[in-house]
Image (tube, rainbow, N blue to C red):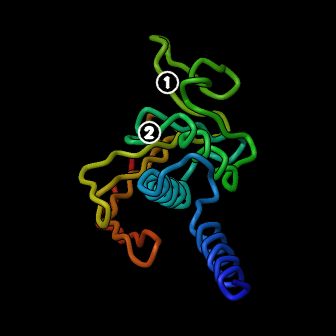
Amino acid sequence: MMKTLLAFIAAVAIFLVIGCSSQENTPNVKNEERQRMDLYISVMKGAFQEENGGNGFVAVKLDTLIGLSDQAQEEVLKELTILSPNIDSFEDTRNDKTKFELDANGRLNRSIDGTLLWVEVEEYSESKAIITGVSWFGSSGAVFPKYEATFENGTWKLKLISMAVS
């Protein structure tokens, strides 16, 4: 009886250790969603590093983050604070005249010491993607690095396949 009880306790302990170590850092975000988040974050960071309009603020077009819940989108914003402590969605900042200058027709002309980021997904599977990151800072200032991304050993590896500059 004692051996059975000890075996049961050991099995429960092993289950708890394995179960806890396999959980994501972000509660309620599924593995597939976490994988997409990691891809989008890597691509936007890459575009920002290529060129940017400053880090006074970073705005992200959340509507381009295909396949992510609202909670996952918020987590993307949190993880991009490495680029700027002032990060928000573009939807919340588009009319902020301290962040964006508009032309005579009310269209965005340029950012003011900040950068607008988004992604354009061309192809996506769980192990491969063709994706463009956009770092926009003005009508005549933006970079569009296009990547072939492969998911290997739990991380996305980005290979730059083309670069457009405005």
- Amino acid at circle 2: Ser
Image side of residue 53 versus residue 32, left or right: right
- Residue denoted by label 2: 140
- Residue 107 locus on image (x, y percent): 46, 18
Location of residue 139 in the rendering, given as x and y in whole percent from the top left corner = 45, 33
Question: Reading the chain from its start, which is encountered first: label 2 or label 1?
Answer: 1
What type is the residue that disc 1 sits on?
Answer: Leu
Q: Nearer the viewer, residue 101 or 80?
A: 80
Image quarter of the N terminus: bottom right
Residue 37 in the figure: left or right of residue 147: right
Q: Residue at x 35, y 71 (%)?
A: 159
Look at the picture and state if 18 lies above or below 132: below
Residue sitting at the far bottom: 3
Look at the picture and state if 102 lies above or below 40.
Answer: above
How packed is label 2: few (under 14 Cα within 10 Å), some, or many (20 or more)? few
- Number of residues whose C-alpha sits closer than 10 Å to that of mark 1, classed few (under 14), some (14–19) or many (20 or more): some
Residue 158, position in %: x, y?
Answer: 40, 69
Per the rendering, the mark at residue 77 is none
Total marks in image: 2
* Residue extending furthest toward the left: 123
Q: Residue at x 38, y 57 (%)?
A: 145
Residue at (37% x, 70% y) in the render: 151
Query: Whole-percent x and y of residue 18?
Result: 60, 74
Q: Residue 96 appears in which quarter of the rendering?
A: top right
* Residue at the spot 68% in from the left edge and 47% down from the top edge: 55
Dot 1 corresponds to which residue?
108
Residue 32 placement: quadrant: bottom left
Say what secondary structure mark 1 lies in. Answer: strand
Left or right side of 125 for 109: right
Secondary structure under tag 2 reads: loop
